[in-house]
Amino acid sequence: MAVNTVDIDKTRSEIRRQFVLWNIDPSEWEIIYQEDRSNNKIIRLPGATVRYLRNGKWQSIYCYGFSSRGQNLRQCFFLLERLRIAEQHGVQYTGLTFTSEVATTNGEQSRRQDLMEAYDILGAAPDDPVEMVKEIYRKKSQYYHPDKPGGNPEKFKRLTEAYDSIMKSRGSS
């Protein structure tokens, strides 16, 4: 029996497309992966969260029911797609639930995953021009900056680390 594999890059691209269809700016959404940082060791959890700004409020979709990030992210995409279609037909929705499981990765796959997660946190794509990446960072950093009303120092730090990682991978600063 063949195992279904999920192309996580294709899923990320499809999520970006859903937000374009919703007219959501790249600075107003992010994909978050959870990690367990206990005992000075990072354990990657397979779950995925997609956060986006709609009508002035951050909304989140979670999926932790599958053993891989790709599968969980794919389920988030399916829900986003169905929510967009449902909204076109006047359907309103509230509340989502989740479960969690633990999985680990390492090596080159882990480094690539870290970079892709940085893009997800920022809400950018690897093929976006540097100028766009900088603009997305500028917009989001203004939103999360600790000196701004409603700012969040933890999210600002995470966003800045993601941006720095992306710019380092591109040979820019």
Image (cartoon, grey):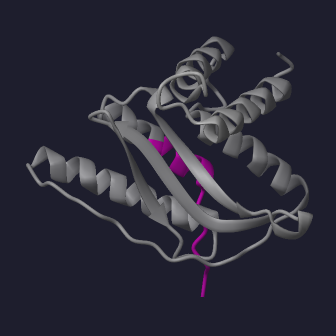
Residue 91 lies in quadrant: bottom left
Q: Residue at x 63, y 11 (%)?
A: 131
Q: Is residue 123 left or right of residue 53?
A: right
- Residue 158's spot in the image, x, y percent? 69, 39
Above or below for 139 versus 39? above
Q: Foreground residue, 88 or 56?
A: 56
What is the residue that sits farthest to the bottom in this orientation?
1
Q: Foreground residue, 135 or 139?
A: 139
What is the residue that sits farthest to the top in this orientation?
131
Q: Is residue 125 left or right of residue 26?
A: right
Quarter that holds the C terminus: top right
Q: Foreground residue, 158 or 153?
A: 153
Q: Foreground residue, 100 or 119?
A: 100
Q: Residue at x 83, y 62 (%)?
A: 42
User: Which segment is the magenta one?
Assistant: 1-15
Q: Is residue 5 magenta?
A: yes
Q: How many discs appear?
A: 0
- Residue 69's spot in the image, x, y percent? 62, 64
Q: Is residue 62 left or right of residue 83?
A: right
Q: Is residue 126 left or right of residue 140?
A: right
- Residue 99's spot in the image, x, y percent? 50, 77
Above or below for 94 versus 87? below
Q: Residue at x 76, y 41 (%)?
A: 115
Q: Is residue 73 magenta?
A: no
- Residue 89's spot in the image, x, y percent? 9, 49
Quarter that holds the N terminus: bottom right
Residue 128 lies in quadrant: top right
Above or below for 18 versus 69? above
Residue 164 lies in quadrant: top right
Q: Residue at x 51, y 76 (%)?
A: 65
What is the residue that sits farthest to the left in this orientation?
90
